[in-house]
Amino acid sequence: MSDALLFQSAHEIAAAVKARRTTAHAVTQAAIAQIEATDGRLHAFTDRTFARALAEADRVDAEVAKGAALPLAGVPYAVKNLFDIEGVTTRAGSKINRDNPPAAHDAFLVGRMRAAGSVLLGALNMGEYAYDFTGENVHDGASLNPHDPTRMSGGSSGGSGTALAAGMVAASLGSDTNGSVRVPSSFCGLFGLKPTFGRLSRGRTFPFCASLDHLGPIARSARDLAILFDALQGQDVEDHAQLRHSSLDATAEIGKGIGDLRIAVAEGYFRSQAMPEALAAVDAVAKALGAFRTVTLPEVARARSAAYVITTAESSALHLDRLRKRAADFDPDVRDRLLSGAMVPAAWVIAAQRFRTWFREAMRAVFRDVDVILAPATPFHALPSGTKTITLDGIAMPARPNIGIFTQPISFIGLPVVAVPVWLPGAKLPIGVQVIAPAWREDLALRVAWHLERLGAVSAPVAA
Amino acid sequence: MSQKADASFDAEAHADHMAKVMDLSVLPEWRATVVAHLIATAAAAERVMSFPLDDHVEPAPVFEP
C-alpha cells in the first residue's frame, strides 16, 4: 500500500477498508513502515505495540469480511502514554512510573477504539505527568514538530501531535487539563477536540489534576473528530467524574452547516496577548464564517489564574509522596513547579474553586447571546525547541507555563472546544483557532470546524 | 503570570517553612526556581482572591455519594 491512503483522513481509510479496496493489515503495515522511517528523528513514540496492531488488524479484516459495521475499521492510531495499554507500563512521561508493573487492562477509551475497529500502534511521548505545554521531556527527548523539527510539537500531548502530523497514524488520543490537546493541535496543524468536562471516561489513565482533566481525540479532519467522538462516548462506572448525560450523534450532525449560528470573536484578553499570526488566524476563520460580531468574556485573566492555582496545588498533592522520596528523578522543569505547588495555602485553592462556579455562571450568560466563540489556541506559531522565555503584550514570562494562556480559561469550566488548523498565506507553520461551544454541545463546534474544512479555510496536511 | 503577588507575601520564607511542614527536600540549586514558581502562583492567587464573591458562591466538586 502506498502512503497515499495512510496520509488521508481516518474516515477515508476506514471507508477503503470497509469497501475492501485495501485491508486493515496493509494499512497497519504501512503505518509501521512510516513509524520506522520517521520516528527516529521525531521522537513521537515511547512504546510500540506492533504485534498487537497486526493482530487487531487481522481481527478487523475478518470482521469486515463478515459484514461488521466498524466506524473506524483499520484506522491506525496511538495514545499519549498516560493511557493504560494492557501489557505496557504506563509511564505518564515520567521516569518514576517506569518502575510500575505493566497495565493489566486497556484504558476505557482504548477499549472503545478497539470496539470501533481501530488499530493501536503504541504509546506516545508527553511532557512529564502532563504538566507541560512544550512537548519536551528530559527522559524521552522532545517530541518534535514534523513541519519544522527545530520547533516544539506543543504539549503536553506532544507525541500525539507529532505522530499525526508526520503521517505515522491517522488519529491519536491525548489529555487536556489546561490545553494539552489544543496546544499540540495548534503547533502541529491538526484538528483537536477537547470535549465537555465529564463527557468521556478517564478510566484507567494516569491523572494530572482531577478537577480539570479531560481526554480527547486529535485527527487530520473535523469529520474524523466527530466519528472518533461518537466512538469514544459511553458510560464507565470507574470514572466518578463522568457525568450522566445523553450521548450525541456528532457524525449525523456535522454536515448541517453553520445555518444561523451566532458566532462571535473573543476580544480583550484574547487579542491583547496574541502575536500577529494568532490574530490573523482568528480573523481568517471569522471571515470565512461571515462572523462579524465580537464578545468580551468576563474576567478571563482571573479564570486563567484560578485554573493555574488549582492545577499546581492539586497535582502537587497527587505527587507528594514521589516528591518526598524521589524528587531528583523528576524532570527538573516539572519538579520545581510541583514542589512550589505543594506549598500552596488551602484558602487559595478554595477561592479558585469558588471562582470557577462564578465564571461558569458568567459564561452561561454569555452563551445566551452567542452560540459559538472563536479565540486563538496559542499566542504564536510553534516555538523553537528549548525556548524558555516569551514576551506577550510587552511582558516577559516563562514559556512553559504560559503557552496555554488562551486554552486554560476555557477548560477551567469544561467547555467543549475544537481546535482548527489555519495556514496563513505564505506561512511555513500552522496555527490553531479555538471553536468554543456551550457545555454539552460538541456538535456545534464540530459543525463549524467541518464547515471551515469544506470551505478550505482550515486543513491538516501531513508534513512534507 | 504577570500580576505581582501581595507585597506582604514572603515567598522565600514561606517556601522554607512549608518545605519543613510538608517534609520536602528542596536542594539549594532548586530553591530559586521553586521560589519563582511560588511567586507566580501567589500572583495568580492574589488575582483570584481580590475578586469579591458572595458567601453563597460555593465550589462545585464532583462527588456523588
Image: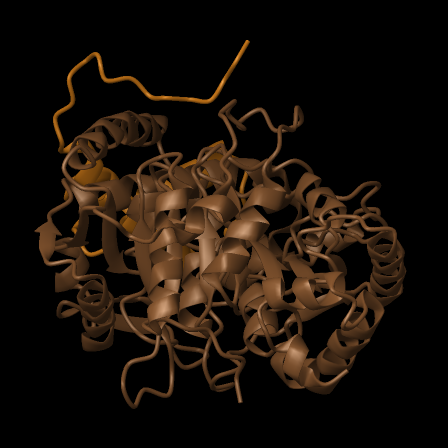
Chain colours: A brown, B orange
Quadrant the N terminus of chain A occupies = bottom right
Residue under the image location 68 percent in, 80 percent down: A39
Vertical position of residue A231 compared to residue A365: above or below: below
Q: Is residue A146 left or right of residue A368?
A: right
Residue A398 appears anywhere in the view: yes
Residue A193, percent from left and from top: 46, 52
Residue under the image location 23 percent in, 17 percent down: B57
Q: Is residue A240 left or right of residue A365?
A: right
Residue B36 appears anywhere in the view: no
Residue under the image location 37 percent in, 21 percent down: B60
Vertical position of residue A246 compared to residue A332: above or below: above
In the rendered image, the residue lying farthest to the top is B65
Q: Is residue A363 left or right of residue A179?
A: left
Residue A273, percent from left and from top: 18, 64
* Residue in front for this viewpoint, A354 or A195: A195
Residue A227, percent from left and from top: 57, 51
* Residue in front for this viewpoint, B8 or A439: A439
| Location of residue A80 by image quarter | bottom right
Residue under the image location 54 percent in, 28 percent down: A242
Residue A162, percent from left and from top: 56, 73
